[in-house]
Image (cartoon, helix red, strand yellow):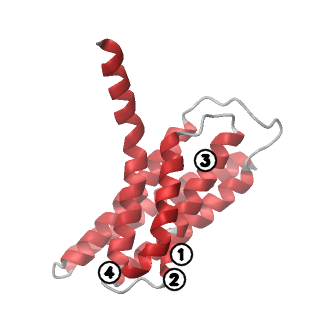
């Protein structure tokens, strides 16, 4: 069961990237609109960030913290969050300048928040160290949720994507900084 869900999550993540890319290519037939192009770019970058975060966690060696636990419920939460975020991205691309109301904020910020929380729980259940940047990203997304009502859909989605990109890029930058410090 867990391997099937893990493979399904890989397929859903790939479809999220593909859907964002296909949206960008479909926009080439329309007259250029900066908000729509930015929304499509935000959707693609967010999908790529999620893809890379999951595969970085998947590549770590496993030391089961809870023997016999498969973590399949965390995969179900991640799949549902990705599907919800794909729908939210489609809405942002269609109406980028629309005000963010509570249901849209719950999808645009809550879905990445739920996905990141499930990823952290899955890493913990596998006996892996939960990276500090994931905790900070979770906190940043939680802080974005109440203030997203004051922005439009594009800004809300862009900020959620920037948080995911910051979480993704933090570890390699910190690792290179530590290596440079040790070599001195």
> What residue is rendered at 38% in x and 72% in y?
156
The quarter of the displayed image where residue 94 is located: bottom left
Labelled pair 2, 3 in contact (Cβ < 8 Å): no
Q: Which residue is mark 2?
A: 102
Labelled pair 2, 4 in contact (Cβ < 8 Å): no
- 1 sits left or right of 134 in the view: right
- 6 sits left or right of 30 in the view: right
Residue 164: give x, y in percent of width and height: 42, 54
Element type at marker 1? helix
Q: Which residue is mark 1?
A: 106
Q: CA distance from mark 2 to mark 3?
A: 25 Å
Residue 120: give its label. Answer: 3
Depth check: 45 or 116 in front?
A: 116
| Label whose residue precedes the other's in the sequence (2 or 4) | 4
Q: CA distance from mark 2 to mark 4?
A: 16 Å
Depth check: 45 or 175 in front?
A: 175
> What residue is rendered at 39% in x and 41% in y?
170
Mark 2 burial class by Cα count in 10 Å: few <14, some 14-19, many 20+: few
| Label whose residue precedes the other's in the sequence (2 or 3) | 2
Residue 21: give x, y in percent of width and height: 34, 63
Q: Which residue is mark 4?
A: 96
Q: CA distance from mark 3 to mark 1?
A: 20 Å
Q: CA distance from mark 4 to mark 1?
A: 16 Å
Labelled pair 3, 1 in contact (Cβ < 8 Å): no
């Amino acid at each position: 069961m867990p391997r099937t869900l893990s493979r399904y999550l890989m397929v859903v993540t790939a479809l999220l990237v593909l859907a964002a890319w296909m949206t960008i290519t479909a926009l080439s037939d329309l007259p250029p609109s900066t908000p729509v192009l930015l929304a499509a770019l935000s959707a693609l970058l967010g999908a790529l960030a999620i893809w890379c975060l999951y595969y970085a966690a998947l590549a770590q060696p496993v030391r089961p913290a809870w023997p016999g636990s498969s973590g399949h419920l965390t995969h179900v939460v991640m799949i549902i969050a990705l599907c919800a975020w794909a729908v939210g991205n489609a809405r942002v691309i269609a109406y980028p300048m629309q005000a963010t109301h509570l249901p849209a904020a719950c999808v645009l910020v809550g879905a990445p928040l739920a996905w990141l929380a499930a990823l952290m729980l899955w890493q913990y259940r596998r006996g892996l160290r939960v990276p500090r940047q994931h905790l900070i990203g979770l906190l940043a997304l939680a802080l974005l949720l109440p203030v997203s009502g004051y922005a439009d859909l594009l800004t809300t989605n862009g900020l959620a994507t920037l948080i995911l990109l910051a979480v993704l890029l933090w570890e390699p930058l910190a690792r290179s900084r530590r290596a440079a410090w040790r070599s001195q």
